[in-house]
Amino acid sequence: GENVEQHPSTLSVQEGDSAVIKCTYSDSASNYFPWYKQELGKRPQLIIDIRSNVGEKKDQRIAVTLNKTAKHFSLHITETQPEDSAVYFCAVSNYGGSQGNLIFGKGTKLSVKP
Amino acid sequence: GAGVSQSPSNKVTEKGKDVELRCDPISGHTALYWYRQSLGQGLEFLIYFQGNSAPDKSGLPSDRFSAERTGGSVSTLTIQRTQQEDSAVYLCASSLFDSTDTQYFGPGTRLTVL
């Protein structure tokens, strides 16, 4: 089945710096790649997603890039702020194929120091 | 509108007892998911209901775990003969049609098995 690896597991940056989190996956048929943010004690929430027919997507300070050939995708957060501190999860889905559910990475704990 | 709700919010039980966890998805959402999140860990997929299709049970860790979705709406996750390693937060999510739609998570049920 699908295997999703996420790096790094923890990331500490200074406020205003950029943060990059990377995920790799194993199933080349995967076609949907969302990112979820989970603040301490709260439920995960979708922050951005990308589909296999697009290479990059941006939403204000957040961007996601996808390299289907290399089977990896990355989350980029620019001008980080303390409220960006949370655990970020990547996920992969292959709806219509062998795997219809989302498989999540193990998460990255991002700490933004003021 | 109302989001995904789960009950109870907390459940403490003794080893060997059965427990039932309930999830009320967003009205009109045809897809429903159950995940398990152990302390400080990622989201472990358990089961996925999509419309009238047979559920994807591939993530259930043992035959002590089962889930139903009645009338295409409310879902119940049942854990029989609970073990201490079952202690975790059980999260439910729903999406409009399938796993390539945004998943909206409930607040979770924190299960503690003594």
Image (tube, coloured by chain):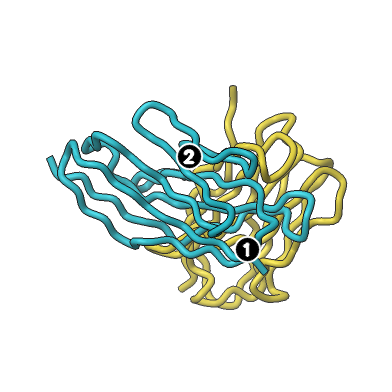
Chain colours: A cyan, B yellow
Image check: B23 left or right of A40?
right
Q: Which mark is residue B19?
A: 1
Residue A8 spot, x, y in % from top left: 34, 61
Amino acid type at image mark 2: Gln
Residue A28 spot, x, y in % from top left: 66, 60
Of helix, strand and loop, which one carries label 1?
A: strand
Looking at this view, is B82 or A7 the one in front? A7
Protein chain holding label 2: A
Residue A12 spot, x, y in % from top left: 21, 53
Q: Residue at x 74, y 37 (%)?
A: B97
Q: Is residue B90 above or below residue B3?
A: below
Looking at this view, is B50 or B100 the one in front? B100
Residue A40 spot, x, y in % from top left: 33, 47
Location of mark 2 (residue): A45
Spot the residue most to the front: A69
Amino acid type at image mark 1: Val
Q: Residue at x 82, y 43 (%)?
A: B51
- Which one is closest to the eye, mark 1 or mark 2? 2
Question: What's the distance in space between the residues labelled 1 and 2, CA to CA?
Answer: 27 Å
Q: Is residue A16 above or below residue A20?
A: above
